[in-house]
Amino acid sequence: MVLTDSLLDFFLETREHTENLCKPLETEDYVVQPIVDVSPPKWHLGHSTWFFEEFILKAHAPEYRLFDEDFAFVFNSYYETVGKRVVRSDRGNLSRPSVEKIYAYRRYVTEAIKTLFQNHRPKAWYDLLEIGVHHEKQHQELLLTDIKYILGNNPLLPKYSTDFEEHAVESHSRDWISMSEGIYEIGHHSDSFCYDNELGRHKVYLQPYQIANTLVTNKDFIAFVEDGGYQKFELWHADGWDWVNQQRITAPLYWHHINGIWHHYTLKGLQEIDNNAPLTHISYYEAFAYAQWKGCRLPTEFEWEAAQGLFTWGRRWEWTESAYLPYPDYKKADGALGEYNGKFMVNQKVLRGGSVATPKNHTRATYRNFFQPPLRWQFTGLRLAK
């Protein structure tokens, strides 16, 4: 656990950073929800605030008065234990509460948390505060990727910022890292913060394997596209092939073929693709098909974790071949917080590493992100193994 004063500072810095991410937005941008997986920015602002109100202030601050009794219904995400909520697909219908009122709500709850933690409190309270801070950091990443989807599907393809760098090139040359067969320890093993799905440190036996020291680049994937990779059924899982044909997928998300040149939408607007930058915004299906095309495969999450100290990571969330499952002796927390990770351990693939949108102080070598195979609005890429 972070020391008391440092944790409160961490909380305040996180609250401020969330709002800084929204500064480039126009008021109209706060409400848009193009697809069910993308939430309006103002919903993220409210939900990350409700988390502190629901799990800390309501439970441990007897003098606290709710800012608005309807906000639990509006900003609960998926916590069945807590009560009813707005259907996820309807978040874009929330023209009210206003953006101004949600910012007032944020100030109200932030001040209440500051007051509550002015004096020494039980360790369990600080543990809740730490979870809440990292929960908001998760939503900072979602904010950026949801904003990108909102603006990237606007016909005008407007810029979000001229400062955010999405596509830093890996400067080292490509090579294969050879890993010996043997027993490796997997899972979180320090006193620093982690999520419950990282716990249950355990041993795994790995066969000898090789893993690339670089991510797959745009140039690599353009070769796959131009070789007809999206038309070769033998490269795809059956579900992936159905997805390609039903959704008419011909390239990664945000790619546009203009006058014979590949472009993509970025947070800086529409730009010509940098061939040497890491590929991004691909589904697990596409990652798998590309690996098949190369005569390689995706690493398992255990292979990735065992080797991660030997390569640079953090630019892209990297698809792995591992299903999202509990580690040995996994234990869900009691109450609503037990819904945070455990109930999603089905029909999902694990991603490792972090991305350019992941906030600082929020990623680890043991961090297990997870998404359903067709999703690609996050900064997802891949690293080959064989």
Image: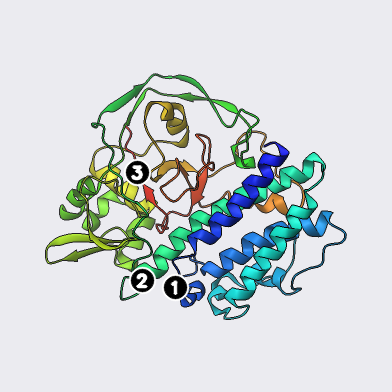
| Amino acid marked by disc 3 | Leu
Whole-percent x and y of residue 162?
Answer: 34, 59
Q: Please tell me which residue is depicted at 49% across the width and 60% down the height of the picture.
A: 21
Crowd band around label 3 with a 10 angstrom C-alpha radius: few (<14), some (14–19), many (20+): many
The dot on residue 153 is 2
Q: Is residue 332 left or right of residue 326?
A: right
Kind of element beneath mark 2: loop
Q: Secondary structure at mark 1?
A: loop
Tell me whether circle 1 and circle 2 mark residues in contact (CB < 8 Å): yes
Q: Is residue 60 visible?
A: yes
Residue 155 occupies quadrant:
bottom left
The structure residue drawn at horizontal position 63% and vertical position 63%, both measured from the top left corner, is 47
To which residue does mark 3 refer? 382
SS assignment at label 3: loop
* Residue 282 pos. (x, y %): 35, 54
Q: Give above or below for 348 relative to 106.
A: above
Label 1, label 3: how far apart the Cα atoms are: 26 Å
Of mark 1 and mark 3, the one earlier in the sequence is 1
